[in-house]
Image (cartoon, helix red, strand yellow):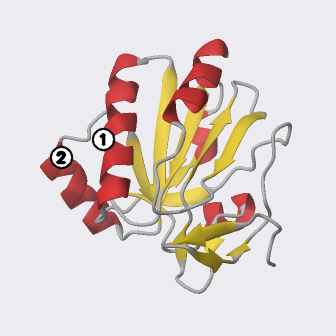
Amino acid sequence: MENNIKITFAGNPMPLSGKAIKVGDKAPNFTTVGNDLNPVNFSDYSGKVRIISVFPSIDTGVCALQNKRFNKEAAEQKNIEIISVSADLPFAQKRFCGTEGIDSAITVSDHKDMDFGTKYGFIMEPLRLLARGVIVVDKDDTVKHVEYVSEVTTEPNYDEALKIAKELI
């Protein structure tokens, strides 16, 4: 199920599959795998303002920057839950988080079922990786901000997502 979102990866058009999410949608629940290999459901964080930070691979420079930035924000913004999701294996995420001191953002893997990627339209199908983006969801599970980063090798607009999330507290 290809969606209409247009992005590029290193300048090359990259088709996305899954259902594209948009502002005003009810945020679908999804199940991922935590660094301890246990299931993590988005609904576990209901009733809170959440930022979903989406990225292709923890082992790339831009993804590392994105995770460090959102981890720093998570440490400072106690009323906002930041959930970082990629298709990396939980072992790779755990290694990275341990090495880089990522301890405030929640890092989860979509590798097993691609449940998040399918429900939010972030799967770069030819690569079986997630595209880069940011979603802000309010306490009532309504999507308030969506960014599918148009060029996957660039960082998202942190300031815009954080501004919207802070307004929802």
Point out the tag, 1 or 2, that comes first from the N-terminus. 1
| Residue at the image point whose x is 78% and y is 52% from the top | 21
| Residue at the image point whose x is 50% and y is 30% from the top | 81
The residue indicated by pointer 1 is 68
Mark 2 element type = helix
- Real-space Cα separation, disc 1 to disc 2, in angstroms: 8 Å
| Spot occupied by residue 98 in the image (x, y as percentages of width and height) | 17, 49
Rendering quarter of residue 169: top right
Rendering quarter of residue 16: bottom right
Marks 1,2: beta carbons within 8 A = yes
* Numbered circle sitting on residue 9: none
Image quarter where the N terminus lies is bottom right
- The answer to whether one can see residue 35 in this image is no
* Numbered circle sitting on residue 100: 2
**Looking at this view, is 16 or 97 the one in front?**
16
| Residue at the image point whose x is 65% and y is 23% from the top | 164
Q: Is residue 69 above or below residue 33?
A: above
Residue lying furthest front: 11
